Image (cartoon, rainbow, N blue to C red):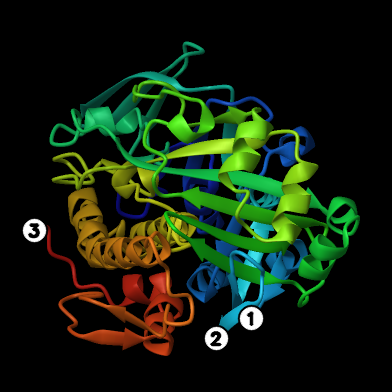
Amino acid sequence: MAGQKVRVVVVGGGIGGLVAAAFLAQRGHQVTVLERRQRYAESEFLEAAQGINLTKNVWTCFGALGMTSDFEQISDYGKDCTVRKHTDGSTARIVNSLNGHRFVHRTDLLRLLYQYATTAGATVLQGESFTEISETSEGVNLKLQSGKTLIADLVIGADGIHSKVRSHIPSAKHIQPVLTGDCTFLVDGPKEVMQRHVASSALYNDGVPPFHLWTAPQRSIVAWTMTRHQRYHLQMNDHSYGTGAAYGLDEVDTEGAFVDRYPDMEAFRRRWSDFEPALRDLLGETVAVTKWRIAELPELPSWSSESGRIVLLGDAAHAFPPYAGQGAAMAIEDATLLAALVSRSACSQTMLSITRAYENLRRPRIVGFRDIIKRNIQQWSAEKPNVEAQQPSVNGAIPSGAQGAWSTMERYQWIDGYDAVAEAINCHFDAKL
């Protein structure tokens, strides 16, 4: 590959896949993205409740793409989180952040990343997927549903928790996601609905934009505004969901979709009826919610094939519950680091060395977030949550064997201070895991 462009096929045109595509295409590589959905980044998809919280570690990645200003134009900013008592909404405490948060609708972000990837020269094939993958001495061959064949030096599996690419990594091919028993319900309150009632109007206008957390026995809610303060987005977490009995359901299978619409608002309102009036007002005008059964992926022995030519990122490699606000961020960090390593070293290193280095650098950070998530769930789902005491410390080893309690600021420094491009620049290659 010395002196040549790297031929890259990215399977999955979601956030992580498009970040990788944009970064690689900007640096002159030949990039093709396969996305099974048709017209997936168009306006009709904006109706689904899909808010994302992104912190400075992600802004640094976007800076490497030159899209900082454009990202700020589509996102809302919030500095600190107000922890509210779930019964009456009174303030329990303020959790101060280091650099703040930016909140964005997933579709808005997909549109922007799609624009950056295609403008840089990446080809995005929508409504397309592969039927076969095989490795040869010349690279990786992909047969597509359309009948076409692509040849790649590197295939990046960015195709989510149900990854098809993962089945082509021998050590990971039989590993399937496992439901945790938690469920997150996603609700959007349009500005006009929030301002229709006294209680919800006060909640909506409490800060510009507001960023709130409620905890109750076995449940928690995180909420913020997005789409330039036009929507109030709630992630309502039920940590004792099980098979859905409290919602009139009996979901025991793991084969169906983990995300779908839930229309029984009467049962939903009963389950959340002990929360403050502002939330009851909003739910009183909500006709359906998005139900997301939470699953995680057991740790994979390897994120890449034996040759290193097929590699996973994001949920395809390490899906975990969304209770650290860093799921999308990890896909973005993965994509940025991997693309930066390829761009830096494709002429001097084998794909095996590059993908092994990528995995060696990323695994400790993923382990750290898994630890944070476990402790957040313990705090948020306690039978008698002590909201005044939640924070300011996170206990345990986060990351790389660090011991003892971390203050809130130390945790934010570890999260926000990560620079994926700097990791790639400073990397010392070793093909061993």
**Element on which disc 1 rests:** loop
Q: Quadrant of residue 72?
A: bottom right
Q: Residue at x 19, y 48 (%)?
A: 299
Task: Give the residue type that dot 2 points to.
Answer: Asn
Q: Are marks 2 and 1 in contact (CB under 8 Å)?
A: yes
Depth check, mark 2 against mark 3: the one in front is 2
For this view, does 398 lie left or right of residue 281?
left
Q: x, y percentage for residue 410?
A: 37, 87
Q: Residue 432 carries which label?
A: 3
**Residue drawn 76% across and 77% down?**
207
Name the residue located 56 percent from the left edge and 71 percent from the top edge: 59
Category of crowding for the residue at label 2, using alpha-carbon neighbours closer than 10 angstroms: few (below 14), some (14–19), many (at least 20) = some
Q: Count the labels in the image.
A: 3
The kind of residue on which mark 1 rests is: Lys
Percent x, y for residue 385? 42, 68
Q: Distance between the residues labelled 3 and 1?
A: 41 Å
Identify residue type, mark 3. Answer: Lys
For marks 2 and 1, the one nearer the N-term is 1
Reading the image, the residue beneath label 1 is 79
Give the number of the disc on residue 96: 2
Instruction: From the viewer's perspective, tell me whether residue 142 is left or right of residue 91.
Output: left
Q: Which residue is drawn at 23% across and 66% down?
A: 364
Q: Can the viewer see residue 266 in this picture?
A: yes
Disc 2 or 3, which lies upstream in sequence? 2
| Res 245 → quadrant | top left
Neighbor class of circle 3 (other Cα within 10 Å; few <14, some 14-19, many 20+) is few
Question: Where is residue 202 drawn, in percent x and y?
Answer: 82, 70
Tell me the SS state at disc 3: loop
Sooner in the amino-acid sequence: mark 3 or mark 1: 1
